[in-house]
Image (cartoon, grey):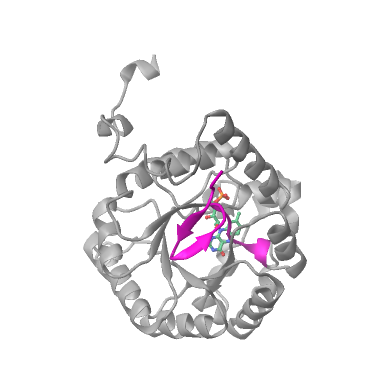
């Protein structure tokens, strides 16, 4: 049975990779993930602002996450221990030395020069690829969707011009004309798109009058949005597609592959069940394929994409009776 896949030009034995998170912070955990079969690992993000101390602190304010899931506490980084640039580069080098699987660095920069400068340093430190985590809050009323998209496309073009390793873009689901934007990123040279980033939940504490951020772990219900988006892009862009968000089981991997994903990134499932969960998902995937007489993931990939199903509107159509 052939589970192999190619993502960002990297030939991988199967599509299960570890998504960007603190799972990659500890070398023993990284080795355990490789031993459990991870095909590649994405490091947590280097935040340009972290070099000055701000943004990661917000991202990792996970008080509710700690309370709601005891097992996840181990992986909740202490904001004061967040890595600066030099530490990140050293950590990347150490991870590269510790494992044989491809190591993908993740970058969230702010300034134009920050994107290219950091990308260069990550490449020099040995990253096999870079995942750009481009996020624009778009809460400024003077900034249009076109402005936001133009900036992102320029970032991708600049990073691609100055780097010799593959570049993926991790997208947010909050885009107005999603497929058009994806095709522009593809045209700017993105080697892959990761669908989608999953954010902390912001809530309002009505007693303390504070904004409270939590980062609850996902479940498979979050896959739906990603399946539809992947199905819309599969076979229509040059780069490869990754699904991140809501991948917990072998069935989720099968669905992702049928939508058109080359790889699936797991974080929540590994935080909940540990590195060994990769082995379980892989074994279940092989068992499912054997039972359903699939020889390879390649023959399944994209068979449920918009371009290949007889009724592409099936992904969008509302059925009123579902509410009855
Ligand atoms: C504790 C934690 C930390 C994360 N850190 C990052 C990060 O540094 N950069 C990033 O792009 N995504 C980060 N993510 C998002 C994950 O990479 C992933 O996109 C998201 O969790 C959805 O996948 P899942 O459903 O398997 O959890 C983080 C997620 C969690 C739970």
Quarter occupied by the C terminus: top left
Is residue 108 placed above or below 324 in the rendered structure? below
At which x and y percent is residue 226?
Answer: 42, 45
Residue at 51% of width from left, 48% of height from top? Answer: 245
Q: Picture quarter containing residue 241?
A: bottom left
**Part of the protein shown in magenta:** 1-24
Is residue 267 placed above or below 254 in the rendered structure? below
Residue at 60% of width from left, 82% of height from top? Answer: 89
Relative side of 3 to 316, left or right? right
Q: In this orientation, which residue lies closer to the viewer: 72 or 78?
A: 72
Q: In this orientation, which residue lies closer to the viewer: 125 or 101?
A: 101
Q: Is residue 22 magenta?
A: yes
At which x and y percent is residue 122?
Answer: 52, 80
Q: In this orientation, which residue lies closer to the viewer: 178 or 257?
A: 257
Q: Is residue 240 magenta?
A: no
> Is residue 88 at all visible to an observer of this figure?
yes
At which x and y percent is residue 287?
Answer: 62, 35
Residue at 27% of width from left, 61% of height from top? Answer: 141
Relative side of 170 to 270, left or right? left
> Is residue 249 at all visible to an observer of this figure?
no
Relative side of 137 to 21, left or right? left
Q: On the rendering, which quadrant does ligand 1 occupy?
A: bottom right
At which x and y percent is residue 21?
Answer: 61, 61
Q: In this orientation, which residue lies closer to the viewer: 157 or 293?
A: 293
Q: Picture quarter containing residue 152?
A: bottom left
Quarter occupied by the N terminus: top right
The mark tally for this picture is 0
């Amino acid at each position: 049975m052939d589970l192999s896949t190619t993502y960002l030009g990297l030939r991988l034995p199967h599509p299960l990779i570890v998504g960007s998170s603190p799972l990659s912070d500890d070398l023993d955990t990284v080795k355990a993930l490789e031993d459990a079969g991870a095909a590649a690992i994405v490091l947590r993000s280097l935040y340009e602002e972290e070099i000055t101390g701000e943004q990661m602190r917000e991202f990792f304010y996970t008080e509710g996450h700690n309370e709601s899931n005891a097992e996840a506490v181990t992986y909740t980084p202490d904001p004061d221990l967040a890595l600066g640039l030099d530490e990140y580069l050293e950590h990347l080098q150490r991870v590269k030395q510790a494992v044989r699987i491809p190591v993908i660095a993740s970058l969230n920069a702010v300034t134009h020069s920050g994107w290219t400068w950091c990308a260069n340093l990550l490449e020099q430190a040995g990253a096999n690829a870079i995942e750009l985590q481009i996020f624009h809050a778009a809460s400024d009323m003077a900034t249009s969707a076109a402005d936001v998209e133009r900036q992102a496309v320029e970032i991708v073009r600049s990073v691609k011009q100055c780097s010799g390793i593959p570049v993926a873009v991790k997208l947010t689901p909050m885009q107005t004309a999603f497929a058009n934007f994806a095709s522009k990123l593809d045209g700017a040279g993105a080697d892959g798109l990761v669908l989608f980033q999953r954010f902390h939940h912001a809530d309002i504490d009505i007693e303390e009058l504070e904004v409270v951020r939590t980062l609850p772990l996902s479940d498979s219900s979050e896959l739906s949005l990603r399946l539809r988006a992947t199905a819309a892009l599969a076979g229509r862009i040059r780069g490869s597609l990754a699904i991140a968000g809501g991948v917990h089981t072998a069935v989720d991997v099968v669905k992702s592959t049928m939508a058109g994903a080359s790889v699936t990134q797991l974080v929540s499932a590994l935080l909940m069940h540990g590195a060994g969960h990769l082995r379980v998902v892989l074994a279940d995937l092989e068992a499912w394929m054997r039972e359903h007489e699939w020889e390879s993931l390649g023959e399944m990939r994209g068979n449920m994409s918009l371009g290949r199903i007889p009724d592409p509107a099936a992904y969008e159509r509302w059925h009123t009776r579902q509410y009855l």
